[in-house]
Amino acid sequence: MPAARTRNAESTRADILAAARVRFGSDGYERTTLRAVAGDVGVDAALVIRYFGSKQDLFAAAAEFTIDLPDLGAVGSDGLADALLSRFFAVWEEDATFVALLRAAMTSETAADTMRRVFATQVAPALAAVTPDHPAERAGLLGAFVVGLATTRYVLANPAVANLSHEEVIRWVAPVIEHLLTGPAPRSR
């Protein structure tokens, strides 16, 4: 018989969020159920509902993360890739939330909306500080590039990319990042 859980609301809430991140990451948004998350923690699904309200609200809470970007205006253009990727690596590897959200965003509009919100509120403003023109387009293209890189490295686990060290990834992609953010914009036709 499993040991009884101690009554600690804060700890139980944190356990539910941790289990939800794992479930959303492995099963995706659509296949994750409140009952499965509750079972992973050893509580009743009603308790999950009491703390979070709904599956969508649980997902929103589980998907919260912060990308602590440096002041890119103080970084030279040749250091942009290192500054950005060092923070992205931290999010991608130290917090399971991003990879869970990335997996879920492929099948869930709720997850995709969360990804867009994080990018629009945390990443795009920081990138706009270093772009000479077309900040929305440059930020959007960089977002597409880094989401593709994260998907290839952490979701698809393509060995050619997944096995590279951080330094190797930075060396390979630095020219692309620098060009997207600060290179000449394409001419209009």
Image (cartoon, rainbow, N blue to C red):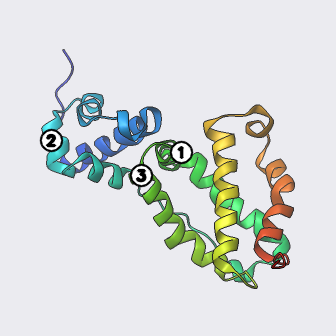
* Camera-nearest residue between 142 and 74: 142
Local packing at callout 3 (Cα closer than 10 Å; few below 14, some 14-19, many 20+) is few
Q: Nearer the viewer, mark 2 or mark 1?
A: 1
- For the point 43% across and 58% down, the residue is 114
Tag 2's secondary structure?
helix
Q: Measuring 23% from the left and 51% from the top, which residue is drawn there?
A: 10
Residue occupying image coordinates x 70% and y 72%? 138
**The label number, if any, that marks residue 169 in the structure image:** none
Q: Is residue 71 visible?
A: no
Q: Secondary structure at mark 3?
A: helix
Q: Are marks 3 and 2 in contact (CB under 8 Å)?
A: no
As measured in the structure, the alpha-carbon distance from the residue carrying label 3 to the one carrying label 2 is 26 Å
* Residue farthest along the top direction in this orientation: 1
Q: x, y (%) of residue 159? A: 76, 32
Residue 99, labelled with which disc? 1
Residue 83 shows in the view? yes
Q: Which residue is mark 3?
A: 109
Q: Nearer the viewer, mark 3 or mark 2?
A: 3
x and y percent of residue 99 in the render?
53, 45
Badge nearest the viewer, 3 or 1: 3
Q: Which mark is residue 47?
A: 2
Tag 1: amino acid: Val
Amino acid at circle 3: Glu
Quick check: 185 left or right of 126?
right
